[in-house]
Image (cartoon, rainbow, N blue to C red):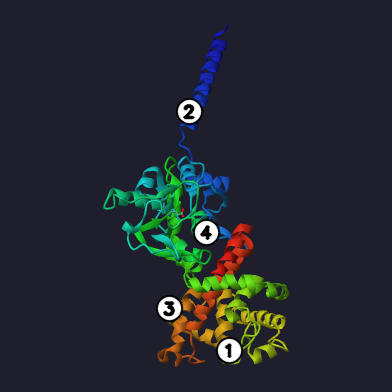
Amino acid sequence: MTRAARVRRRLAIVLASCALAAGVFGVALLLSRPPLPVVDRVQQRGELVVAMREAPSTYHEGAGGPDGFEYALVRGFADHLGVDVRFVFPGTLVELLDDTMRGAVHLASGGLAVTPSRRQRLLFSNAYEVVDEQLIYRRGSERPRSLDDIAAGDLHVIGGSSHEETLTSLRNGAHPGLGWISRRDVGVAALLDALERGEIRLTIVDSNEVGLSQRLYKRAAVAFDIGEPRAIAWAFPKRADSSLRDAANAYLREIDNDGRLQRLRARYFGHAGRLNFVDTRDFWRAVRDRLPAYRAMFEQAAADTGLDWRLLAAIGYQESHWRADAVSPTGVRGIMMLTQATAKQMKISDRNDPAQSITGGARYLRVVEKKIPERIPQPNRLWLTLAGYNIGFGHLEDARILTQRDGGNPDLWMDVKQRLPLLAKKKYHTTVRHGFARGGEPVTYVDNIRNYYDMLVWFTTTADDATRERLLAQADD
Ligand code: GLU
């Protein structure tokens, strides 16, 4: 081998080993690179997987698909990240928490309380809600006044829930005699079902759930609050890094600062608790005894006007309790309680004829809606329309002006609702064009209709046959 050849060979060996070393180094570098933060992986994948609990306060099937406070909150977060959401529904609360802990989902939502023992296993976002845990007793049975009134076999609670944790700490503290039955197999709906049927007498439900549930469970009555208020938050696996939780906190801060969180609360809980026991019973009684005669008419009017028949039916119930012969001292009459002038304007010849009244009411709702500025989107548009339908568009405009003067947003029902009652006060109604009006009435009116509408949606969409039967059976006593 010549010298030149030897040099070339050595050079080749050196180069080859350099390349090898570089390759090994590169692979090592790749292997040692820290994994992508969870939030980046979620964004890369384009999907947030969320464990959810089904309940009126969290997630349920609504008029236009899934709905509920927690649902809306999670959707907002997913939009903020620019990803889709996939909801999974573990069978029990214990499974939901376990799945989250072992990282089978990105986060868990569903009115979850932040408790000391959960904090050891899970990472929590900042709180977006605070609830009281309320002892519920079966209406008609004796109302417990204190924890000492609770017989051990009477109280059934969800196993592994914050409610059970509250009871445990009370028992370890000042109430060593406290006893209860822990039910690992059920959720809040099953317990309220059992209470309604008379199988159990006491349970514990979060306060935000109580207002919504009382529309569906007439027997559920509040005895008193147990323990301290609880913060509600999203739970994340602890084994993952905290990037997704941090992103959630940033999102929650943002919607808290710009008012969106408050609007969501108002939207999902603002009207709850308005109906009392008698209102609820009478409503289900009318659904059973009177609605069937008019349902097809509401459906027809809805089809003609592009509205939801259940909304029209809810208005009809609020107006006349579905009585075709209803008359008021002010001269309005019929199922939809139209004035003579409105009936004429809507080309209705006989206000007492239920089909005509319903058609007239539906058309009139559309007329009022057209007057609401186009920029206002749903659902505010609908609530403002209903208020205008009730009190007259001019007065609604006055209330919107008062809202604006007061620094509120005249396009938000939540803000206008607060100022409508001012129309009854001289100090205010003398400053607006249409003068005095009983402005508290449209607020009750809209709240009631929202409750009836929710209840009809529940009845026709969410409820299974057994639930429907139970709801109608509530009318009996
Ligand atoms: N807030 C309860 C908890 O965190 C859940 C309520 C329920 O399951 O109804 O355990």
The residue mark sitting in front, 4 or 1, is 4
The residue mark sitting in front, 1 or 3, is 1
Task: Indicate which disc, 1 or 2, sits on the residue closer to the N terminus.
Answer: 2
Q: What residue type is labelled 2?
A: Ala
Q: Name the residue tied to disc 4.
A: 197
Q: Distance between the residues labelled 1 and 3?
A: 37 Å
Q: Which amino acid does label 4 sit on?
A: Arg
Percent coordinates x, y for residue 427 in the rendering: 40, 90
Task: Indicate which disc, 3 or 4, sits on the residue closer to the N terminus.
Answer: 4
Q: Distance between the residues labelled 3 and 4?
A: 49 Å
Circles 3 and 4, Cβ within 8 Å, touching? The answer is no
Q: Name the residue tied to disc 1.
A: 328
Q: Residue 28 carries which label?
A: 2
Of residues 460 and 221, the one drawn nearer to the viewer in this rendering: 221
Task: Indicate which disc, 2 or 3, sits on the residue closer to the N terminus.
Answer: 2
| Residue at 53% in and 84% down | 396
> Can you say whether 148 is above or below 349 in the image?
above
Task: Indicate which disc, 1 or 3, sits on the residue closer to the N terminus.
Answer: 1
Q: Name the residue tied to disc 3.
A: 407
Q: Is mark 1 on a helix, strand or loop?
A: loop
Task: Indicate which disc, 4 or 1, sits on the residue closer to the N terminus.
Answer: 4
| Residue at 61% in and 58% down | 466
Circle 4 packing at 10 Å, graded few (<14), some (14-19), many (20+), is some
Of residues 433 and 265, the one drawn nearer to the viewer in this rendering: 265
Q: Distance between the residues labelled 2 and 3?
A: 61 Å
Residue at the far left: name it: 174
